Amino acid sequence: MIIKDPVCGMEIDPTTAFTTREHMRQTFYFCSASCAEQFDADPHKYAMSGSATTGFNLSLPLSSIEIPILGLKKASQVSALQNALGAVAGVRTAAVNAASGIALVEYDPQVVTLPALIAAVKSAGGRVGGAQTRIGVENLRCASCVQFIENELKATPGVLNASVNVGTQEATVDYLPEKTALASLNTAIETWGYQTRPAASQEPVDQQQAAHEKEYRRLMNRFWFAALVSLPVLVTAYPQFIPIVRDWSMEMLRLAWAGAALLTLPVLFWSGSDFFSGAWAALKHRSANMNTLIALGTGAAWIYSTFAILFPGIFPAGTSEPFYDVVAVVIALVVLGQALELRAKGRTSEAIKKLMGLQAKTARVIRDGQEMDIPVEEVLVGDVIQMHPGEKVPVDGILVEGSSAVDESMLTGESLPISKKPGDEVIGATLNKTGAFRFRATKVGKDTALAQIVKMVQDAQNSKAPIARMADTVSGYFVPVVMILAVLTFVAWFDFGPQPQLVYALVTAVTVLIIACPCALGLATPMSLMVGIGKGAENGILIRSGEALQTAQAIQTVVLDKTGTITKGKPELTDIIIVSSRSKVESSRPSTFDLQPETVLRLAASVEKVSEHPLAQAIVEGAQARGLELEGVQHFEAIPGLGVSATVAGRRVLIGNLKLMDRENIPLGGLVEQSKSLADDGKTPMFVALDSQAAGIVAVADTVKEDSAEAIAALQKMGIEVVMITGDNRRTAEAIARKVGITRVLAEVLPEDKAHNVQLLQAEGKKVGMVGDGINDAPALVQADVGLAIGTGTDVAIEASDITLIKGSLKSVVTAIEVSRATMNNIKQNLIGAFFYNTLGVPVAMGILFPFFGVLLSPLLAGAAMAFSSVTVVGNANRLRSFRPKFSAR
Amino acid sequence: MTPLQILVTLGGLALCIFIAWFFWLAPKGQTRAADGAGGAQEVAITVKGGYTPDVIVVKAGQPLRLLFTREESASCSERVLFPDFNQSALLPEGQEVTLEFTPTEPGEYGFQCQMGMLRGKLIVE
């Protein structure tokens, strides 16, 4: 065999080659040391080049790849894509399938790399699907290495794009999980002699936490430096109080002050650099913020002080004393405040972290008949995943083999494990309890139920509550107003203040600049929303926005849809009555005939098993729940509008309403009365006749959920009017309402009129919350001030609702209102606190108390107050974390 | 009043007027979104002590792609919010983050950091 030296192109025999190199799992042979050296300098260049003339290297087979294309709609796009891909040098064929959203490309990997194909797709307006991962790179220093690593990554099969960031020391790689194993990406980086490490994290929240940690350390370093400098500077500022210093001569003091001037410079431009760069950036945008105030205050103090010690002569007597202490201490305090605020902020996103922590990290997929553990990010739709007892379900899917019980409490709040059989849905992040099974992934990545919940909560946490609008408007004008007030303060003290006027004027103006705290105002709402909405999510309540949360606390009337909200939404067998002896289902009193409730139920259920009516299903399930064996049925006949008839074990069984019994001339005697009283209780009675003789009644009803009455009582206790709305007849509706303690019933309301009825309630001047199922009740949910949809665990994206209750219980309604009330209270405390702080603090700093009490606020105290006012706001928001709902979540 | 006091008073009042003019009244420079790939309008925004550019003019009804790059570590700016569009994005330092949505109604919409210290304006025409 003859092979080509990749550098000089000479054809050599591999067995006699001078030396060899391994690169990208391929062996290269060289004719000489110099060729090998050239190769070592840039292996990539040579490894990638094909024939210089044709672009094709025929000695290597073509590669084919399926590139997922997102959002392909129009046919014109398909041909545009196809042409763009076909035009890339080195591409043999390109076929785009719009239906499957895949471009199948055959290409020569020696000529064209995937990133070039992706660029072609993008230039034709297509978007490429695929996964993204980040890999940490240790000790990445030189910018040129970035290029090498990027190229190496881009040349790795399946990589769509790669970029390396020196700042974060991380590589971000877009790749096709079908083609690339994560390990090969690490190998690509390691070939350049760099150590890889896990990236800060895949999870944006962890990443944010890492960034916070870094920022905290940065701020604390700056704080400690400023604090250390503050000590000697304070000594020079108050010489009269310090034993030895007080005896210093004026010359000695002046020298010490000059030292303080130099010492505070690095405090200004290192510890306080954020304020100055921030103020400058804001100034360029013709805006001003907290940075502007601090920079102006400390900057003015430093410049004045320096002038005072450099040119004492030009100042009136007694005004040539510096106050460098203000510079150092204020910067130290404000930086410390920022660091503490950051710490406290981190805790506000705990709820999201908890939710994200539910996600499994790996999945055991079966590919090509082999079980392999892969990171959950690489699981594809259609993968079959093997589950063992005690494992977390990694993604959403459909069970295909085996069976088990799955604990879904973390997502739905349902405390009992749910049994799963083939065809059932399994949800990612739930816990497999008992059995082994296999399921096919249907939703992965950001499409899973958990990911959607997280996304919805995050979006809501960062939305605006209407109450914040005012704070926003105020803070838009706040800083320039404070600057104007500072100027006016200066002028007033200079014109009317006591001697030395210049010192008083400057100190008060600086104090005004420093004490004003726009941050506290800005932080008040978002921090509380963050915690409150997170708290809701922890309790299975997904609040869509700050606006929904604010409206929910003001709800005066709650409208509850009956079916599926108050009740289970599914009929159940409630009573069996046999002729002339009434008995509840459970009792089995012997009767005068040879007739037992079980017999009647067994025969009725046997007949109903053939029927498809939902009420029939309830009777069959009732019989099965009591362990009754059902029998074979002959001559089954459904009589429309009346009932059914059939023969079971030689007996003719008739089941139906009064009309059926009348038609068959069956005397009912006392049963008619009993059926009426059952109907009064909201139940649906059905007469049973055996061999043309009345035998009894079976009654079914949509039963009330166990905790509905308790939840409704709690709502009423909170001062909320509870109204039931239903399409049922008034008698049935009122029977249910009595059971759960509701007095106001809107019965016989057609589904399309529900929204109108909600509107009527609103016309009474009430804020109405509507609780329903999100599908049939959608118009009413939209009409209501707050629509609360009772979900079934995974369908979080209920469009019509403002709040989704992922547990089926009415208790969630109570908790939702409790959470919103607690959060709104917290926001109000914060806003009032921040407003009061500023409206009291600024006038005091201006010296409003001076004419009356002769007191002035020290700028040092102002700095401390300003630093801790924003920490207090965040701290107060964190108090919400201890919120406990009346009805515990789990 | 001494002449110096009168001078300081007049200077102070002039400064107040200048502050009001500078921050509120003076017209701001606007940046128009450019046409990007796939029929979307595109703007790259740098986040450092403010948004550059901070007044952005876009067309209504055309998808808008905003590319944010945050070049500072101060946690204030770690999230950008478009409250009127219910959009927000976490901006890790040094990473380009894309935010895509389609403004439909013409008007002026503010965008800002989480606590409203940094602000910008989206003008939809």
Image (tube, coloured by chain):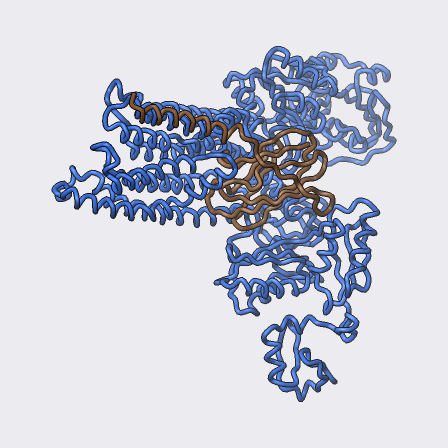
Point out residue A742 in the picture as x, y percentages from the top left corner. 59, 15
User: Front-most of B31 and A132?
Assistant: B31
User: Front-most of A123 and A747?
Assistant: A123
Left or right: residue A707 compared with residue A4: left
Tell which residue pokes out farthest to the bottom in this image.
Answer: A16
Q: Is residue A616 depicted above or below B101 in this figure? A: above
Left or right: residue A104 compared with residue B13: right
Quadrant housing the N terminus of chain A: bottom right
Point out residue A578 in the picture as x, y percentages from the top left corner. 71, 21
Q: Is residue A325 depicted above or below A473 in this figure? A: below
Q: Is residue A525 depicted above or below A189 in this figure? A: above
User: Front-most of A191 and A529?
Assistant: A191
Which image quadrant for residue B9?
top left
**Chain B as rendered: colour:** brown
Q: Is residue A538 visible?
A: no
**Chain A as rendered: colour:** blue
